[in-house]
Amino acid sequence: MRKYETIIILQPELGEDDINIVTGKVQDVITSYKGELHRMDDWGVRKLAYSIRKCARGRYYYVRYDGVAEMIAELERRIRLDEKVLRYQTVNITDEPEKVVPEKKAPVVESEMDEVAEVEEAPAETATE
């Protein structure tokens, strides 16, 4: 199973009942796909960088869990259908580092180095008017 985190931005004026419905949906999807919910934090109402559906603020929720790719697809589908949700983003945070391919530099030929040195040593021309 992979580790994921999702940040959900809800409409700021929602009541506790509406918020519990949305968070309940998230918990239901995770448990139905035999995922493991690690934490669900309410980050509170914050100002948005730009207005979304005429809302200048949004209530942020942070969810961290383990699961499979099918679970993510279903979770995002259910979140997308909910009108109370302004935005969401899911990120894979599995501890496996990505393989980085080092850049290969072309070998420098000595004649090229001489040309570069000549260009650097040449005096800069001054403009006379």
Image: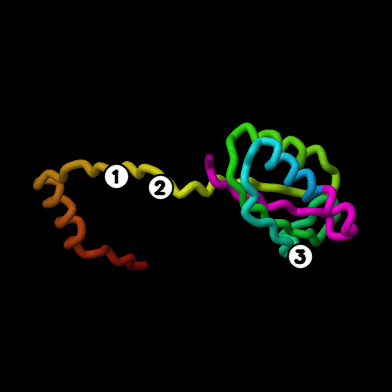
Mark 3 secondary-structure assignment: strand
Nearest-to-viewer mark from 3 and 1: 3
Residue placed most toward the observer, 34 or 29: 34
Disc with the residue nearer the chain's start (2 vs 3): 3
Disc with the residue nearer the chain's start (3 vs 1): 3
Residue 61, given in percent of the width and then of the height, sits at 72, 57
What's the amino acid at mark 1?
Answer: Pro
Horizontally, residue 125 falls left or right of residue 122, namely right
Residue 39 on the magenta span: no
Residue at (66, 36) in percent of width and height: 33
Q: Residues within 10 Å of mark 3 (few under 14, many from 20)?
A: few
Residue at the disc numbered 3 = 44
Horizontally, residue 23 falls left or right of residue 2, namely right
Residue at the disc numbered 2 = 97
Q: Is residue 118 above or below residue 66?
A: below
Q: Residues within 10 Å of mark 2 (few under 14, many from 20)?
A: few
Could you tell me how far apart the alpha carbons at marks 1 and 2 are, in whole angstroms? 15 Å
Mark 1 secondary-structure assignment: loop
What's the amino acid at mark 2?
Answer: Pro
Residue 7 on the magenta span: yes
Residue at (11, 52) in percent of width and height: 114
> Hey, which residue is sitting farthest left in the picture?
110
Horizontally, residue 76 falls left or right of residue 114, namely right
Residue 32, given in percent of the width and then of the height, sits at 70, 37
What's the amino acid at mark 3?
Answer: Gly
Horizontally, residue 118 falls left or right of residue 4, namely left
Residue at (84, 48) in percent of width and height: 21
Could you tell me how far apart the alpha carbons at marks 3 and 1 are, in whole angstroms? 42 Å
